[in-house]
Image: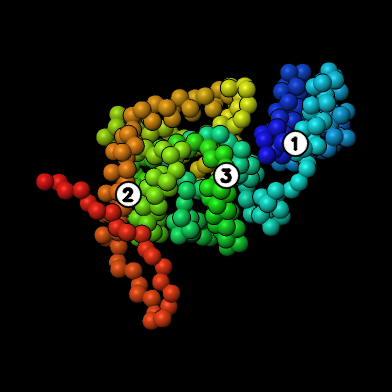
């Protein structure tokens, strides 16, 4: 599926065009709602990408927003049809009711991104998490999220991972980890150590994945806004073909403001240059994994006759002498 045929891409083009036209004319969302005889919440949800807009609703809205040039109208109507073509799995009620709106949009854009930049000082990003590590991080929200929310989010992370690695047009992934991520245990030492080994494995197998570590010794204080992702999308408008996803604790947001995205990209590039290169980063990750696995209690021995699964091999330590 090309970006021009993608429901997510089509939805984004329509809502950005509507918002830009409304703001250019100086109309508020409430004014648009009154003119169209809709609720204000409907306008907000259309502009945020929460819902699609039908061609029948779109045509009079375009006229009200002074978009009347035939080719442009036809293009927006075609995008409206594409955006409603089929329901994706993340829009099904059994999934969408347990995810935030920004996280569902993030999944859409992951499917068509050409590059993904992850900056994190807390945990390994969702699509690169192992099942055990993902469960450990989500279990930190027990008592704040319903059990069903946690289970659906766990399955969603695993599906995101599966679909990412199944992509024929695999995106470039730049993962920038603060060194603290290597030390912070999610669940227990074994879970975190095995997660680090898995990260090393996928980076070896996929040349598109570049992993760097920002060491404690780097002259680069951490940004105050925490972890974030920048997704580059197909398109011929460099300043407008990216989205920013920010997450902090139980809150998240998807940002499309070009200035905001550009600022986050500048910070990412600055820290990327200040970080260890890929081989040195792999060495530090290997050492951290070894420390974690050495400190972990022995894995439970399976009962006699039970099937065994191969555990990740422990990384060899480099000699210091």
Q: Calculate the distance from the C-alpha at mark 2 to the C-alpha at mark 3.
A: 31 Å
Q: Residue at x 28, y 54 (%)?
A: 315
Residue 154, how many percent across, how many down? 55, 57
Q: Nearer the viewer, residue 190 or 308?
A: 308
Label of residue 167 in the image:
3
**Residue that carries the numbered disc 1 in the rendered image:** 46
**Residue that carries the numbered disc 2 in the rendered image:** 183
Q: How many marks?
A: 3
Pointer 1 or 2: first along the chain: 1
Pointer 3 or 1: first along the chain: 1
Q: Residue at x 72, y 39 (%)?
A: 7
Please tell me whether mark 2 sits on a helix, a strand or a loop. Answer: helix
Q: Nearer the viewer, mark 2 or mark 3?
A: 3
Quarter in which the N terminus is drawn: top right
Residue 133, how many percent across, how many down? 44, 56
Residue 228 appears left or right of 55: left
Q: Nearer the viewer, residue 193 or 120?
A: 193
Q: Nearer the viewer, residue 223 or 240?
A: 240
Q: Calculate the distance from the C-alpha at mark 3 to the C-alpha at mark 1.
A: 29 Å
Alpha-carbon neighbours of circle 1 within 10 Å: few (<14), some, or many (≥20)? some
Q: Is residue 131 visible?
A: yes
- Examine the image and state in which quarter residue 136 appears: bottom left
Please tell me whether mark 1 sits on a helix, a strand or a loop. Answer: helix
């Amino acid at each position: 599926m090309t970006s021009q045929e993608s429901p997510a891409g089509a939805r984004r083009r329509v809502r950005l065009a509507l918002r830009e036209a409304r703001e250019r004319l100086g109309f508020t969302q409430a004014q648009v709602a009154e003119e169209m005889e809709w609720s204000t919440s409907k306008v907000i949800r259309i502009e945020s990408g929460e819902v699609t807009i039908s061609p029948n609703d779109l045509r009079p809205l375009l006229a009200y927003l002074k978009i009347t040039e035939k080719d442009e109208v036809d293009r927006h109507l075609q995008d409206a049809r594409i955006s409603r073509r089929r329901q994706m799995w993340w829009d099904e009620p059994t999934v969408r009711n347990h995810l935030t709106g920004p996280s569902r949009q993030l999944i859409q854009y992951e499917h068509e991104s050409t590059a993904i930049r992850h900056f994190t000082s807390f945990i390994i990003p969702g699509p690169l998490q192992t099942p055990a590590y993902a469960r450990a991080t989500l279990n930190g929200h027990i008592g704040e999220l319903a059990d069903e929310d946690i289970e659906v989010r766990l399955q969603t992370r695993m599906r995101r991972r599966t679909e990412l690695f199944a992509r024929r047009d695999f995106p470039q992934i730049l993962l920038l980890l603060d060194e603290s991520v290597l030390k912070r245990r999610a669940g227990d030492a074994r879970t975190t150590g095995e997660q680090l080994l898995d990260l090393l494995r996928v980076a070896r197998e996929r040349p598109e994945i570049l992993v760097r570590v920002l060491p404690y010794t780097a002259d680069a204080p951490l940004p105050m806004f925490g972890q974030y992702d920048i997704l580059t999308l197909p398109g011929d408008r460099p300043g407008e073909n990216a989205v920013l996803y920010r997450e902090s604790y139980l809150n998240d947001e998807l940002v499309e403001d070009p200035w905001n995205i550009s600022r986050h990209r500048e910070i990412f590039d600055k820290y990327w240059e200040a970080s260890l290169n890929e081989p040195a980063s792999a060495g530090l990750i290997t050492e951290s994994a070894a420390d974690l696995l050495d400190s972990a209690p022995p894995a439970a021995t399976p009962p006699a006759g039970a099937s065994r699964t191969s555990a990740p091999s422990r990384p060899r330590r480099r000699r210091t002498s």
